[in-house]
Image (cartoon, grey):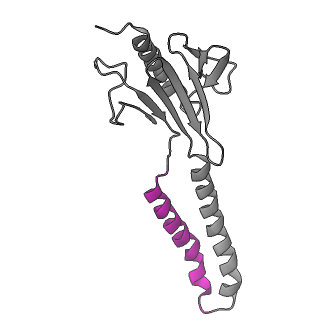
Amino acid sequence: MPYRWTDAEGHAVPSPASDSTTAADQLHLWPYRSLPRKGFVFFIVATVAMISLPLFAVLGRVELWWLLPFIALAVAGVWWAISHSYRTGEVLEVLSFRGPELHLIRHDPGKRPRDWEANPHWVRVEMHPSGGRVPDYLTLRGGTREVEIGAFLTPEERRQLHRELQLRLDQARAPAAS
């Protein structure tokens, strides 16, 4: 899943839905990438190879020089489009459980980070099956403000995250054992 629960040192811990006694201190969420960087290189090489195949018919002729700028433009366009997709997909949401406060920071590319704080005792995790920006829209409500979380996740992932957040908030609300 494109999210991970971690402890204070940044080590991955099991989700709150597991039977683990370790409470996660942070939740990191990011959009799913269907094409990793190595796949990007392979895709560009395959695109160049496939586009170059018809050029063998005009090797040694003047028409080749008329076609090369269009081939280069097509490859550059594909490169730019995928690179732009990577840049706009560099979203990161970090939800921290620090003592008596819950802190959510959303990092969007090219924008200032947006943050939200609330007391976990008063925060409610709400699932909006319809009427939201996406199906099974997930929000956190604390005080007068409501913020979205994980809008880039799939509906199944948002439903799972809803359960895990509810369990983690219940853990945060429980009185500390003496």
Please determine whether, in this image, residue 120 is positioned above or below residue 149. above
Please determine whether, in this image, residue 93 is positioned above or below residue 127. below
Asked whether the viewer can see residue 128, the reply is no
What secondary structure characterizes most of the magenta part?
helix
Q: Locate residue 61 relative to residue 37 in the image: left or right.
A: right
Q: Please check the rendered image and state whether residue 47 is part of the magenta-colored stretch, yes or no.
A: yes
Q: Give the x, y percent position of residue 74.
A: 66, 68
Q: Give the x, y percent position of residue 57.
A: 59, 83
Q: Nearer the viewer, residue 122 or 32?
A: 122
Q: Nearer the viewer, residue 176 or 131?
A: 176
Extent of the magenta region: 35-60
The residue under the point 59% across, 57% down is 83
The residue under the point 65% across, 74% down is 71
Indicate the quadrant where residue 124 lies: top right
Quadrant into which the C terminus falls = top left
Quadrant into which the N terminus falls = top left
Q: Give the x, y percent position of residue 62.
A: 68, 91
Asked whether the viewer can see residue 102, the reply is yes
Q: Locate residue 27 relative to residue 122 in the image: left or right.
A: left
The residue under the point 39% across, 8% down is 174
Q: Please check the rendered image and state whether residue 68 is part of the magenta-colored stretch, yes or no.
A: no
Indicate the quadrant where residue 18 lies: top left
Q: Locate residue 107 relative to residue 4 in the image: left or right.
A: right
Q: Locate residue 103 relative to residue 78 in the image: left or right.
A: left
